[in-house]
Amino acid sequence: MSISKKSILTIVGVMFIAMVAIVFSACGGDDGKNKNPSSYRVTCQDGQWYDISSASQIVPAGNTVTVTVETQPFIMVDKVFANGVECVASDTVGQYTFTMPEADVTITATVVDAPEITTAEYGMGWSFAPSQISVADAGDTSFLANQDFNFSFGNQQGFITNTTNTDGYLSNVKIYSTNQAVIKDEALSGATATSVTSGYQSATAAKFTVDLTQVKLGTTTIVVEDTQKGRIISKTVTVVPFGQAVNGDVWTVYVTVDVSALEGTDYQNSDFRVFLSDNSEEYVYGSTYNETQWLAFEWADLVDGKKTFEFKYNPEHEFDIYVGYGTTNQYDNYVYMPFNLVGGVEESQIEDRGIAVFDENGATITIEVDDANL
């Protein structure tokens, strides 16, 4: 009996299908048992000042995945998430783990400002950097409402090339803020060199300025980056309402003005004023006291030729105190005295520093310090 060509093809086809079925069954494809787990993609979402990486980009479901977060030194990781689920921090700093789900995963992170960096290599560091600054007073322009921050590049190895650009700024120094809602980068101008070597080839110190008309209440970190030597310092700064900035101790001092020696003279009818002026470069705009505090008084305000006034005082700053008096509103006579009580107050210091003579008239100013401040 002859077999037709068509029958032969049919038999071959049946045999092939049977063989495929046997192989598929051996691999477990028919009942779902022992099959290889499906794999999914891991995508890492970097941030402005941090990078996230994963050792594997395609991972089988159920496997443990380790991701690494590397940050700039002024930022630190708060939490890391896989599809919104918080990852587990490992014993290795900057590494986090999660179990791969049956889905693609996106890795994200939240960060917070790190503790401020006060010094860097070769002695780079802050010379003056207030922790609190204030918003501008109503009506003040940036000409008055500004605050300088000063820093040094450290020792000779830390000096940087004096690459001042057309704006007058050092092109190898970047200044920026981590919280643009509080201090935006546009409010920061500088850095400008404040000290240079002979020949102006290297900058040894610099400053930048904050335009207080462009700041908002809140806290941020201001970063100074030396791009030439790869160094960073940072400062945590809080912006407060005008008149509420506190940087250091603030004491209450009492100034007693004794002008009894002027009785019977033309100066008895003077318009008097007493001044206490913060002479320090570290005075901060918008502080709890004005840079120059003053009060007016007349002879009728005095008791036995004396009157006591209350002022605010920072014992770490240099102050000048003076009283003006004269006729027809012309303060053509002054008594002047530096006033500084750094390191505490003793009775002998008060006596030595607290008496000043009014020209040839012999009147005195006595400075008293409230016992509560000692």
Image: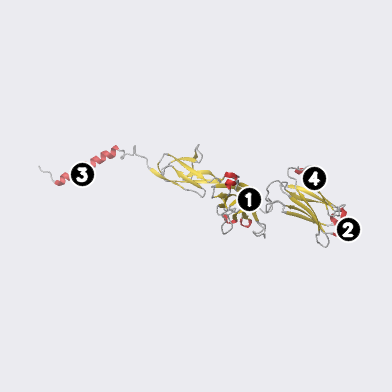
Q: Amino acid at mark 2?
A: Thr
> Which label number is shown at residue 265?
2
Could you tell me how far apart the alpha carbons at marks 4 and 1 are, in whole angstroms? 33 Å
Furthest toward the left, the residue is 1
Q: Relative to 211, is 2 on the left or the right?
A: left
Q: Relative to 208, is 11 on the left or the right?
A: left
In this rendering, the count of numbered labels is 4
Q: Is disc 3 in contact with disc 4, using a CB cutoff of under 8 Å?
A: no
Q: Position of residue 316 (x, y in %)?
A: 71, 46
Packing grade of label 1 (10 A; few <14, some 14-19, many >=20) is many
Q: Nearer the viewer, mark 2 or mark 1?
A: 1
Residue 13 visible, this orientation:
yes
Instruction: Locate the C terminus and report the quarter of the image it occupies.
Output: top right
Q: Residue at x 80, y 45 (%)?
A: 350
N-terminal of the two: label 1 or label 3?
3
N-terminal of the two: label 3 or label 4?
3
Q: Which residue carries the number 1 mark?
A: 150
Packing grade of label 3 (10 A; few <14, some 14-19, many >=20) is few
N-terminal of the two: label 2 or label 1?
1
Q: Amino acid at mark 4?
A: Ile
> Which label number is shown at residue 190?
none
Q: Which residue carries the number 4 mark?
A: 350
Secondary element at tag 2: loop
Q: Position of residue 40 (x, y in %)?
A: 40, 44
